[in-house]
């Protein structure tokens, strides 16, 4: 790893674990001062997308559990480790979730990596179910371990990306750890959410409606709705509303069902394709639906990038 080992206080070294197609990275790229040291991701397709759209990020295609951190770091001091371990074991959208003992559970591996890298601060993201269910005890045990390790100010909370300016909702669990007192991101858009229309209308105006007819069973569910709406064509939808006005934030986008969202715009129906989904998540239009539906929302990530940068500057100045 060819990196300057001398710490430059105006640049903060970042490692992203389980990087996917870079939702976290897109948000951190909106804030000056972050320098990507490494992104680790196991899936070749996601690595290729990452390399194409974020050429400033060194990507390592590998299982996070198998990374030899001593070799990779070669003495470099890392400021921040972020990561969203796979959420399938805990996701409410996955009927085959197995919880903590699911072999895909990457949370303990994330915690081990943090201990090996020993950054000044870390942030883990996952689905809310992990923090409000029978799984919470396991997470609490790992938080206690991290506190014992030296991340004295480790805490967890569920935040909605729409409260940070995103044109879609996305409630996610964040676990934030530092060795000195910290602040959490400020909810800049609580009560004044951004409409999905701002991001979707320019894209839809530039393409033909693809005419995708709504499934028959959806039609009664949206009866009485007016004007431009986004429809979630999932049978027995328990996760949220069946439709939402284009003048509100969209519901949470998902990866598992492929393209199941439709948009009624000026009386015509459109499938929500990757460019529309990417716009709502603040990602590049070249990302794929699965990468977008699994990502941290970029507005949410941007709020974290600002908060964590402020923490790092504060501790530098007080050192
Ligand atoms: C929830 S997604 C992360 C999304 C990412 N944080 C973002 O903001 O776009 C989890 C990612 O972990 C990857 N993954 C799963 N198991 C892994 C492992 N053992 N090592 C590295 N990556 C893994 C998956 O391919 C998937 O892209």
Image (spheres, rainbow, N blue to C red):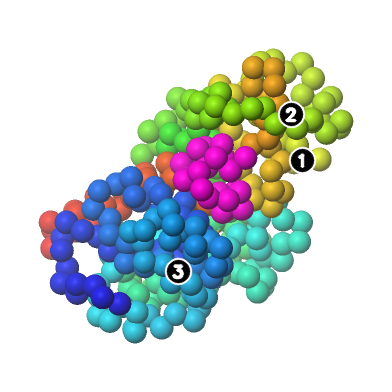
Q: Is mark 2 within 8 Å of ligand 1?
A: no
Give the x, y percent position of residue 171. 55, 44
At x 56%, y 54%, the residue is 291
Question: Over which residues does the magenta segment extend?
Answer: 273-293
What residue sits right under mark 2 in the picture?
211
Position of residue 166 relative to residue 294, above or below, is above
User: Closer to the camera: disc 3 or disc 2?
Assistant: 2
- 227 on left or right of 219: left
Query: Within the magenta stretch, is there residue 292?
Result: yes
What residue sits right under mark 1 in the picture?
234
**In the picture, which quadrant includes the C terminus?**
bottom left
User: Closer to the camera: disc 1 or disc 2?
Assistant: 2
Q: Which SS does the magenta portion mostly show?
A: helix
Ligand 1 shown in quarter? bottom right
Disc 1 from disc 3: Cα separation: 32 Å
Give the x, y percent position of residue 175. 45, 58
Give the x, y percent position of residue 50. 45, 59
At x 36%, y 44%, the residue is 303
State which quadrant residue 228 falls in. top right
- 289 on left or right of 189: right
Q: Of callouts 1 and 2, which one flags the residue occurring earlier in the amino acid sequence? A: 2
């Amino acid at each position: 790893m060819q990196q300057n080992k001398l710490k430059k206080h105006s640049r903060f070294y970042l490692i992203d674990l389980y990087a996917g197609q870079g939702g976290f990275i897109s948000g951190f790229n909106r804030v000056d001062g972050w320098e990507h040291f490494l992104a680790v991701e196991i899936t070749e397709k996601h690595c290729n997308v990452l390399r194409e759209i974020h050429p400033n990020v060194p990507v390592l295609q590998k299982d996070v559990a198998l990374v030899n951190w001593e070799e990779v770091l070669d003495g470099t001091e890392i400021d921040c480790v972020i990561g969203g371990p796979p959420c399938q074991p805990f996701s409410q959208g996955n009927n085959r979730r197995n919880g903590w003992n699911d072999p895909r559970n990457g949370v303990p591996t994330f915690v081990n990596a943090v201990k090996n890298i020993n950054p000044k601060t870390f942030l883990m993201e996952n689905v809310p179910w992990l923090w409000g269910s029978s799984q919470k005890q396991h997470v609490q045990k790992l938080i206690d371990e991290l506190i014992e390790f030296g991340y004295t100010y480790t805490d967890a909370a569920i935040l909605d990306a729409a409260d940070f300016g995103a044109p879609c909702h996305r409630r996610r669990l964040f676990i934030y750890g530092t060795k000195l007192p910290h602040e959490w991101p400020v909810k800049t858009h609580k009560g004044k959410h951004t409409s999905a229309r701002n991001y979707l209308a320019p894209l839809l105006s530039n393409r033909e409606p693809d005419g995708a007819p709504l499934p028959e069973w959806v039609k009664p569910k949206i009866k009485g709705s007016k004007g431009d709406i986004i429809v979630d064509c999932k049978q027995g939808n328990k996760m949220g509303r069946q439709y939402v006005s284009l003048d509100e934030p969209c519901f949470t986008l998902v990866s598992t069902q492929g393209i199941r969202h439709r948009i009624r715009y000026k009386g015509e129906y459109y499938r929500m394709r990757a460019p529309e989904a990417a716009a709502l998540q603040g990602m590049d239009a070249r990302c794929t639906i699965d990468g977008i539906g699994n990502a941290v929302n970029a507005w949410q990530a941007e709020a974290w990038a600002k908060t964590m940068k402020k923490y790092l500057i504060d501790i530098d100045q007080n050192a």
